[in-house]
Image: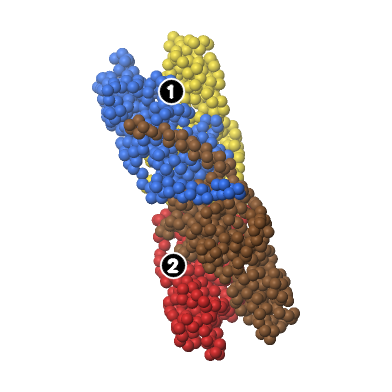
Chain colours: A blue, B brown, C red, D yellow
Amino acid sequence: MRYGFLGPETTFTHQALLQALAETPEEFAGTEPELVPFASVATATTDLLAGDIDALMAPIENSVEGGVSGTLDVLAATESITIVAEQVVPITFVLAARTAMDLAEVTTVSSHPHAQAQVQGWLRTNLPEANVAASSSTAAAARDLAAVSEQEAAGRAAVCSPLAAQHFGLQVLAEGIEDFEGAQTRFVLVTREGRIPARTGADKTTLVVQLPHNRSGALLEMLEMFSANGVNLSRIESRPIGDFLGRYSFSIDAEGHIEDRRVAAALRALHRVCPVVHYLGSYPRVDGQRPEFREDYGDDAYDQARDWVESLTSMVTRPDGNR
Amino acid sequence: MRYGFLGPETTFTHQALLQALAETPEEFAGTEPELVPFASVATATTDLLAGDIDALMAPIENSVEGGVSGTLDVLAATESITIVAEQVVPITFVLAARTAMDLAEVTTVSSHPHAQAQVQGWLRTNLPEANVAASSSTAAAARDLAAVSEQEAAGRAAVCSPLAAQHFGLQVLAEGIEDFEGAQTRFVLVTREGRIPARTGADKTTLVVQLPHNRSGALLEMLEMFSANGVNLSRIESRPIGDFLGRYSFSIDAEGHIEDRRVAAALRALHRVCPVVHYLGSYPRVDGQRPEFREDYGDDAYDQARDWVESLTSMVTRPDGNR
Amino acid sequence: MRYGFLGPETTFTHQALLQALAETPEEFAGTEPELVPFASVATATTDLLAGDIDALMAPIENSVEGGVSGTLDVLAATESITIVAEQVVPITFVLAARTAMDLAEVTTVSSHPHAQAQVQGWLRTNLPEANVAASSSTAAAARDLAAVSEQEAAGRAAVCSPLAAQHFGLQVLAEGIEDFEGAQTRFVLVTREGRIPARTGADKTTLVVQLPHNRSGALLEMLEMFSANGVNLSRIESRPIGDFLGRYSFSIDAEGHIEDRRVAAALRALHRVCPVVHYLGSYPRVDGQRPEFREDYGDDAYDQARDWVESLTSMVTRPDGNR
Amino acid sequence: MRYGFLGPETTFTHQALLQALAETPEEFAGTEPELVPFASVATATTDLLAGDIDALMAPIENSVEGGVSGTLDVLAATESITIVAEQVVPITFVLAARTAMDLAEVTTVSSHPHAQAQVQGWLRTNLPEANVAASSSTAAAARDLAAVSEQEAAGRAAVCSPLAAQHFGLQVLAEGIEDFEGAQTRFVLVTREGRIPARTGADKTTLVVQLPHNRSGALLEMLEMFSANGVNLSRIESRPIGDFLGRYSFSIDAEGHIEDRRVAAALRALHRVCPVVHYLGSYPRVDGQRPEFREDYGDDAYDQARDWVESLTSMVTRPDGNR
């Protein structure tokens, strides 16, 4: 099995993948999984569809920064893939340099813009004069800093994960520098379509839904379809469709599994009303939390209702006496 | 075939039944239908269930007086019956007496309370001094007046249908005396359960629904189930459940047939949520008016949505690899 | 003070009026109220508007029979009246005759159709052979039976209130003959418009609402306006508007007083959307039950919201710099 | 007047500000506006509140990339600011270098990540081998490229606006390289709180709303408040609140002005129900499009409803006879 992740090595995505492999040993028994870093979710997805890798770990939302557009847009645009698991990784950052130095000596800080956004308060307070340079990932910031000459490294620091600092042999100047303690990023494990994990009772279903654009109140109508079937949403993100301003699709996590009758009923209603409903998978929640719902949203209630209506329609008789 | 109707002879119900028999000759070809008057819908229903009659015509609503409680409550309380047709009869009344007389000579007017209610304005204006006496039907008022001695008939008049006046040989003192011109009564033809007429495309479905009594907003929730499936209601009547004040059931006519996917979907939702859903039948509308609804409420939309969800659930795989 | 009631004497309405006068002595201190029976709610209302009486007690709904059409329709059609109080009277019936006799000897039973409907089960079981005659009220049935000759009274019985039997000197053959134990009728005390009783915290508001007839989903929309303001309905009755089948107005009791901000907000919304909203009064509930609602439906929440929006609009500045 | 913009010079934000100044000459008559670039919306906002600048132009959403998190989050977190205008700028990119060269010679492309995302398809097709380097803005990419030595500039190109290429004297290697033709970015002009532009009839109102987190269906409830007052939303963006996964605020553009009664009514309802409603301003739409709404959502309908309810409550009378 080959697993792609948003690289380079030591990213939080790498950590999420390691975490997933550690948690589900039976699935990987007897196999030595191979981990493959990718420069972008888009290129990894291309390789996934081509069969070069078997699964792909990608960040989907961060508790501070919100949805990860790069992942959301690729998932929305790609047919024939399925999310089969999720992982949550606590996000903490260190400021690291080649050699120990006072903060006052730091003149340039490099990191990925998403990471910068999460430490900007700390930077403003502690390094108000430092230049901020963008790198393509926090891991790249650390790796690049480790690779330059000692001279070039003078006055430079990187915002990166503790793992990255350790892996690339950097000195930690400050740790826990994120503005919001307790920040987390959620990751999803994506495979080629074909197999949906069975219901555990504590599941999520991920969808991308496009609303009829010529009908005001369409978002309200979509939410009512979930509500009418007792399905809560744990995440809803608007993403532009891309053609012009004011046109959105919605990326949604619904509480429940497609095997839950209430989720299936909500999906049927969506399919009728929305021009695009892209089903991205049903998979176990990492927090194991089971949804609460009224008894009349249970499987039995749906099954009995279906049976009752079928027993009635079986009595419909054509004028010729046939049923 | 034996047909019951709310008697005695010459009631509007009688007229509705004659109208039904005239309109659907092919169903009655080769048979001489027998028409049987009943004193109440309740007793006729008992005979229907016992097999003594094959069908029953009963008034269900009047454009002025509203729902006919006696019929609504019997239909609500009776299992194993089905409405298979409806009829609408224009309601017009005459004031009739044994012999021609001036209105000033009329001292007592008898009629059924429902009829009185429909002519009360005319009575107040034209016969402000007359006593009003209740009879068990307008036909009974006419028949009884025809039966008393001439002496007893002095000063007495009956409010009845033109047909009744003619049939019982009474003189018409005034005609068209109803307060609301254009009043109509709707009647339903009830049979024993077992056969639902096939969909014509212009149909009604009649239900009695009891709401969960411990949940505020339950009526709103019920209406949303129809709305969410594009089903309009052409009639909704609250009727007390009878146990204490403030507890209602709702008698409903929905536009559409149980063979319409959108009606079936609404019924399934009702069955889940409401403690009692009593299906009373789907039958052709007498006005032939076809419902209008958005394309996403059409049969195809429901069928495609069902197929789509089924294609997804077929991919669910147990941990042992079975589907 | 002159109080009208739906007569004749000894009706349940009479009893409701006596009950109201006994319960609110301070309002009637120093005055000897005069009680005036009327033959119909319509005629009493005419006298109320003319100033001949000061208030009117009328039945509005029965726990078994439902809404009292005669009252509902007069209230709906009359401007310039206000409901200021309600009363609830337990409904129990006796079978009474001139002299004691076996049930087997009873050949004719007279009563008002509404009362008959409430004892029809008992009559079917105990007097299956007896003729049923309609009278204009249960009191009239008792009074008339007391008035005929002893010979005419043979075999005749009346279904009436215990009070009526006692008042007219009849013998009680059977008591508690109502089919549904615990039946109740609710009555309202109506005055000329001009004075609404102050809020007690446990109040009802009565309305008649006509829906826009050309818009499907109008009933749903109306209910959403109450729901959006946390207002529960304790009664909703459909009544035909009278012009043609399928056109209804709705008679509604909402939990709360027009002084409650949430009720006022719901009324404002109704007034915008519905072609007719007829406000019939806010008055204390006879059961003293206070409505439960979320904090954000409390007066403070509405007042603070209004103040907040006003503080914003005060910042709007015309191009000329004026506000 | 000093106007801040997200710099450096030649950004699309710069262009939006120039466009705004050109379109509304009368407001700036006799003054020579001073334009001040800022490194971030956060720092510009600090200066705005401190009085160092008078207004600030910032990007808020892009038709391809979606909401601009940096702006949305600063607006959401800042009290005492008001949006007074919007601008829309078409987004088109060029690939520019110091000297003309074949695409095959380009080894490194620098740009801002948002711009890269909008040209990534073109880059994959035309420069599949080139390294992609992040800069802090497209303008910075151009400026930096113009500033390095000719030797360092070899093989390097920048993705930037046509204006930036021209301004910094770069050669355009390819133009119109954006993946989605017709992409646009919307900008808002922000001032200190205190003055809201008067209603034009074609306005937008921008809000940030936080939902009660302990209530499922809260998003649905919020949307119903807009819907119940006939207010459409032209934009809705979820943004994390930042404390933990799954907690969002919503950034909303509603069609209409706070002077519109229907918008004011929706805001009042939001204020009651939502723990946080941050009003960010009402301002003219740049496209001049007037909202369509039913007559019962017009100002007159609201005013008449308010007057009607006030006329009723004026009749409420205390037990002591006072009103």
Q: What residue sits 39% from the left and 19% below the top? A: A52
- Give how far apart the Cα atoms at labels 2 and 1 are: 65 Å
Q: What residue sits 46% from the left and 34% below the top? A: B311
Q: Residues within 10 Å of mark 1 (few under 14, many from 20)?
A: some
Residue hosting label 1:
A49
Residue A195 falls in image quadrant: top left
Q: What residue sits 60% from the left and 56% below the top? A: B85
Question: C137 and C57: which one is in front?
Answer: C137
Label 2 with label 1: CB-CB less than 8 Å: no
Residue hosting label 2:
B244
Q: What residue sits 54% from the left and 74% below the top? A: C113
User: Where is residue C104 drawn, in percent x and y?
Assistant: 47, 81
Mark 1 lies on a secondary structure that is: helix
Residue A243 falls in image quadrant: top right
Residue B172 falls in image quadrant: bottom right
Mark 2 lies on a secondary structure that is: loop
User: Where is residue A310 drawn, in percent x and y?
Assistant: 48, 47
Question: A59 and C153: which one is in front?
Answer: C153
Q: Amino acid at mark 2?
A: Phe
Question: A45 and D284: which one is in front?
Answer: A45
Whether residue B243 sits left or right of residue C280 in the image: it is left
User: Where is residue D304 drawn, in percent x and y?
Assistant: 58, 58
- Asked if residue D149 can be seen in this view, the reply is no
Q: Residues within 10 Å of mark 2 (few under 14, many from 20)?
A: some
D213 relative to D174, above or below: below
